[in-house]
Image: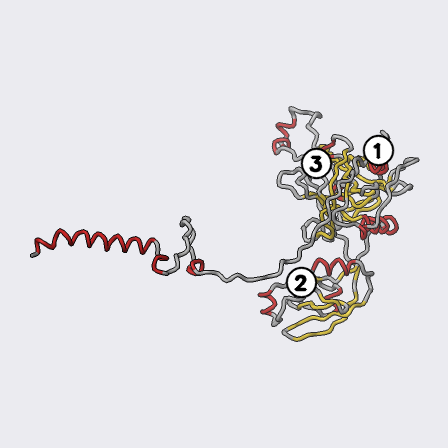
Amino acid sequence: MRRTLLPYLWPVLIGVLAAIVLLNAFPQLIGRPAPPPTAPATPGLVQSEDETQPRETQSREAPEVRQAEPLTRQQGRTSYAQAVERAAPAVVNIYSTRVVEREEHPLMSDPFFRQFFGDELPSRQRMLSSLGSGVIVSDDGYVLTNHHVIRGADQIQVALRDGRETLAEVIGTDPESDLAVLRIDLESLPVMELTDTTEVAVGDVSLAIGNPFGVGQTVTMGIISATGRSHLGLNAYEDFIQTDAAINPGNSGGALVNAEGALVGINTAIFSRSGGSQGIGFAIPANLARNILEELVTRGRVIRGWMGIEAQELNQELAASFGLQTPAGVIIAGVVPDGPADRAGLQPGDVLLEVDGQPVLDPRRTMSDLAAMAPGTRLPLTVVRGGERREVTIELGERPTPEPRRPDGE
């Protein structure tokens, strides 16, 4: 009996297996919906389970975007020759020289060796020279330049664009702003006009005129990159105009002018890792230069208000240690003996919160604001000492003139 049924069993099994395969491949044959097609797997990506579920279609309004006006391709300015012709004659080249003592070889102090030279001993002095630029800003012959250009110079020679040369007299210098005023005695001098730097805007075209590397007067172009730059560690008082016009060694003291040839600032420094221009240059604003010019000419020095303290910025950790919830104010790290702060009773460790009712947030900004006030001005201060607020009145003194640093090479 088993042998008679066996030939019919294999066709039945094969038919059942074929039916199972067809139903899995085509479920719609029995009324079930077909599964959605699956995307090929991408290495590194994992498909979420929600993507296998049918999504409900949502109706949203199209977002509103702002359509820009068509680009205007009008002919731009192709030359700044008029601005250069107006400004360049007032930019001068400055050559400063100084005599320094050369270190004598120890053997030259021995009489035995000195007898071989007799009266023809090698000179112990040598001449050092440096170059820079300056700007004539007055019919009287006053020239603005940088303090570091003429620092320690024994002789200063000024060369004009028209070929004239003369020696210059130092009227005064202000190391803390890195400005100096010279005077030359020549007739029919070209003079550059000064602009109001409160009107200077980021994006304005700027031209740098000077004597880079001693190659002769050179003009470079850029834009005003920023205004009010400080915390650079260049000067005690910083309020720089930043430009990407190329400024190189020898440009110091030269002019940064606008597109109409008016003075915007005195080129002072660059940020560079190579020593050459990398598109980050700094100029002292014309407004500040004008004030320094007037002070040095009329008084011979710059008079600034002074508290007589050393200030330190307050961070979150220091604020918490002083019992303050926010890092507002500055720490008085030191008090000059018998200075205005000392006479007012301020002590190291006090936290200065307000000056004349204005909150103190930046030591440098506060120092600059005080420097603009006249000595003798009385100001109310708010300080914190031992967690308690105190009201103190201080009378500003005159900031002492810093002792000049010895020039390099001495």
Mark 3 neighbour density, 10 Å: few (under 14) some (14–19) many (20 or more): few
Q: Which amino acid does label 3 sit on?
A: Glu
- Residue that badge 2 annotates: 334
Gap between marks 1 and 3 measured at Cα? 31 Å
- The structure residue drawn at horizontal position 75% and vertical position 43%, both measured from the top left corner, is 72
Left or right position of 170 against 53? right
The crowd level at tag 2 (other Cα within 10 Å; few <14, some 14-19, many 20+) is some
Q: Find residue 34 and report its horizontal and vertical position in percent.
A: 39, 57
Residue indicated by mark 1: 160
Residue 347: name its quadrant.
Answer: bottom right
Q: Can residue 294 be seen in this view?
A: yes
Check the image and report above or below for 107 versus 206: above
Q: How many marks?
A: 3
The answer to whether 317 appears left or right of 243 in the picture is left
Q: Distance between the residues labelled 3 and 2?
A: 38 Å
Q: Earlier in the sequence, mark 3 or mark 2?
A: 3
Q: Nearer the viewer, mark 1 or mark 3?
A: 1
Question: Residue 101 got which mark?
Answer: 3
Q: Give how far across and how far down residue 55 sits, in percent.
A: 48, 61
Pick the front one: 258 or 348:
258
Please tell me which residue lies in front, 203 or 386: 203
Question: Is residue 407 or residue 111 the one in the foreground?
Answer: 407
Q: What residue type is labelled 2?
A: Gly
Q: Residue at x 84, y 33 (%)?
A: 160
Q: Which residue lies furthest to the bottom in this view?
A: 388
Q: Where is residue 265 in the image (x, y as percent from the top left)?
A: 79, 45
State which mark lies toward you, 2 or 1.
Answer: 1
Contact (Cβ within 8 Å) of mark 3 with mark 2: no
Q: Residue at x 77, y 43 (%)?
A: 205
